[in-house]
Amino acid sequence: MNLQVEQLDTNEAKFTINIEQAEYRKAQQTVARKLSKDYRFPGFRPGHAPMNLIVRAVGEEAFKYEVADELARSLYPKALEESKINPYGQGKIEDVKEDPPQMVIRVELQPVVDLRNYKGIRVVYTEPVVGEDEIQAQLDAIQTENAIVKLVERPAEKGDLIEGKIVAYNAENEAVFDLEEESFVLDENLDKAMHLVGLMDAVIGISAGETRNVRLVVDDAEEDENLRSTEVAVEVRADRVSSRELPPLDDTLAQTVGSFETFADLRADVEKKLVDYKQKMAQRDYNDLVVSAFSEEATVIYSPSYLGDRLDEAIEDIKQRTKNEEKMELSDWMKLQGFADEAALRENIKQGVENQAKVNLVLGAVSKAENVIVSGDEIMKEISNVAQYLNDDKLVRRSMQDQSYINSIYSRKLTSRVLERMSTIAQGNGDAPTVASYSSDNVVISEGESTSVVEGAAPETNNG
């Protein structure tokens, strides 16, 4: 076998295999014997008809490609081994010639990720700060939740709790939005919650069993741009009116809402939870910036089928989610969403799928370049912890028989570890070079050597 390999710009390779005449004739005879068993030729026993009759029966072009398939079974693996090519899926026969015998196979390659100078990426991390106003807002909410509520027979006053409804209608008398809760507090937050200017003032003085109809203006905070600054008809109904007595922010309140001895303990707990939450959100946002910086720095090349496969997976995921959560078939869901067919849906999600595919490949490349691993012991520990939490001794045995569950744990832990490593590098703690740098907003990339990684299977993750 004589092999020439051409690398294509589409992340594919083209194998041109020159075949010995004797090997080609042998393949023709093998195919002829196989095909002759499927046809009846008068005067010949099955499997013994001459080749010219078989070729005439199946057609010259079809026979030629049957021969090519036969040859490919032995020559293609040898070509892969000789070329050191890392294929993505099976190769496809592109052309076959008989004189002299030659076969051309197009081979899609595994995605290639060049991380370039990822060690020089810098992303500024800003430590979140919890303000006194945020702590006070949480304490006020606790105070409100523990208010003493008493039914009253007087007209509603500011600060009262109203049980009833609020509905806004447009000029066509269509209900455009309403208060989702069945009760509301009569204060300034009511205007903000409903995006209606002057709503609180319009409700003050309403009595139980009374309905009021007023015209108000929708403020600019309303999500629907068509409703902003428009006048709507508002119907307010009060079924019950109750007074609210707020408890003092003291030790008694702290002991009521939890295992706190003093109000200072309650305040410290509120502050800690706020800090933990803001740090978690800040780290999530920071991870997004880091992943974006790594993706923008990297060069990712993949073959056409790779993106097609990712789109197929995304469509299948949508199909399963709509079936499990919406209880409907994909075709019905697409109609409700305004997609004419699956092709329209694929086109709509293509860019997002492509962006996520690049992120996944970059994460996979970083895990290889930085030798980030997750051991079997760590997975076992995770399963054991879940079993202990659920008080289910048999969970470990069942989980070890569920490969998809093990894979999900592995992918989640690997992704988390890769993100930690990327964050470490982006903050300058990853043995990064210290040569000349340039800056763009809060991302800095130092000049240095690139790192290229050929990807096999990247962790399928979504850093959302």
Image (cartoon, rainbow, N blue to C red):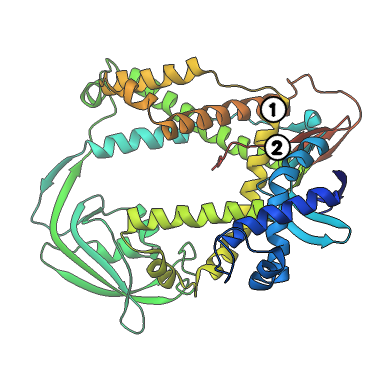
Question: Which amino acid type is marked by label 1?
Answer: Lys
Q: Residue at x 60, y 56 (%)?
A: 34
Q: Quadrant of the C terminus?
A: top right
Marks 1 and 2: in contact by CB < 8 Å? yes
Q: In what quadrant of the picture does the N terminus appear?
A: top right
Q: Which residue is mark 2?
A: 455
Please name the residue that numbered disc 1 is placed on.
368
Question: Can you see residue 395?
Answer: yes
In the rendered view, tell whether residue 245 sits above or below residue 242. Answer: above
| N-terminal label among 2 and 1 | 1
The amino acid type, in three-letter code, at marker 2 is Glu
Residue plotted at (90% across, 26% down):
435
Residue 202: percent from left, percent from top: 28, 66
**Residue 245, quarter of picture:** top left
| Up-down relation of residue 249 to residue 221 (above or below) | above
- Measured in 3D between alpha carbons, the distance from the residue under mark 2 to the one under mark 1, in whole angstroms, is 9 Å
Say which of 419 and 225 sits in front.
Answer: 419
Residue 125 point in image, percent of width and height: 66, 31
Neighbourhood count class around disc 2 (C-alpha, 10 Å): few under 14, some 14–19, many 20 upward: many
- Residue 339 location, x and y as percent? 49, 72
Rendered view: 53 above or below 392: below
Q: Residue at x 59, y 36 (%)?
A: 459
The structure residue drawn at horizontal position 31% and vertical position 53%, both measured from the top left corner, is 187
Left or right, residue 168 beside residue 10: left
Q: Give SS at disc 2.
A: loop
